[in-house]
């Protein structure tokens, strides 16, 4: 994937048109509820306060992540998706680097947290995240909490 092939778009929910927001939420439901056969509250009330990061290819969302501002601890990256048509292209790494950069810009000097599906732990480790919990099951899928230290802090390996 070359840099010219995609663009990064970060904005709040109210900045999307109805058509853009519908497409974004449909992608999330298609992957997290339908594809993963996981009945859970996808629309969880957190979208209005979040930043929504999209990687666009030819104007369409190829990958997405939701960035939540710190509440009790650190900013969080969640709802990480690469659209099925773009999987295997390396776009997951591009998406996560863009999400890390966006967290650094909006929440400077803070560690970044996420809840990783356990099978993706090696991928997130490669981006500097370290496990902070034992494995647990959320919505029928094994997960592990992970944190990426703030820039300038030494990372554990």
Image (cartoon, rainbow, N blue to C red):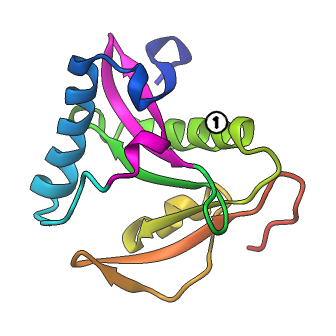
Magenta part of the protein: which range?
A: 45-68
User: In this orientation, which residue lies closer to the viewer: 96 or 86?
Assistant: 96
Picture layout, residue 108 above or below residue 142: above
Magenta stretch, main secondary structure, is strand
The residue under the point 43% across, 36% down is 91
* Residue 54 is inside the magenta segment: yes
Query: In the image, is 39 to the left or to the right of 19?
Result: left
Residue 107 in sight: yes
Residue 77 position, x and y percent, is: 52, 52
Residue 21 position, x and y percent, is: 27, 27
* Residue 46 is inside the magenta segment: yes
Picture layout, residue 78 above or below residue 101: below
User: In this orientation, which residue lies closer to the viewer: 41 or 97?
Assistant: 41
Mark 1: which secondary structure?
Answer: helix
Q: Quadrant of residue 120?
A: bottom left
* Residue wearing tag 1: 102
The residue under the point 40% across, 51% down is 46
User: In this orientation, which residue lies closer to the viewer: 137 or 67?
Assistant: 67
Residue 33 position, x and y percent, is: 15, 56
Q: Quadrant of residue 129?
A: bottom right
């Amino acid at each position: 994937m070359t840099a010219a092939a995609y663009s990064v778009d970060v904005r709040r929910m109210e900045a999307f048109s109805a058509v853009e927001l519908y497409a974004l939420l449909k992608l999330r439901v298609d992957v997290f509820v339908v594809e993963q056969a996981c009945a859970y509250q996808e629309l969880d009330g957190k979208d209005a306060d979040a930043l929504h990061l999209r990687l666009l290819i030819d104007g369409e969302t190829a990958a997405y992540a939701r960035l939540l501002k710190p509440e009790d601890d650190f900013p969080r990256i969640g709802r990480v998706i690469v659209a099925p048509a773009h999987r295997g292209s390396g776009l997951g790494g591009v998406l996560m680097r863009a999400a890390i950069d966006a967290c650094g810009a909006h929440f400077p000097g803070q560690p970044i947290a996420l809840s990783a599906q356990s099978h993706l732990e090696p991928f997130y480790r490669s981006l500097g995240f370290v496990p902070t919990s034992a494995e647990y099951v959320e919505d029928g899928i094994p997960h592990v909490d992970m944190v990426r230290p703030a820039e300038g802090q030494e990372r554990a390996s």
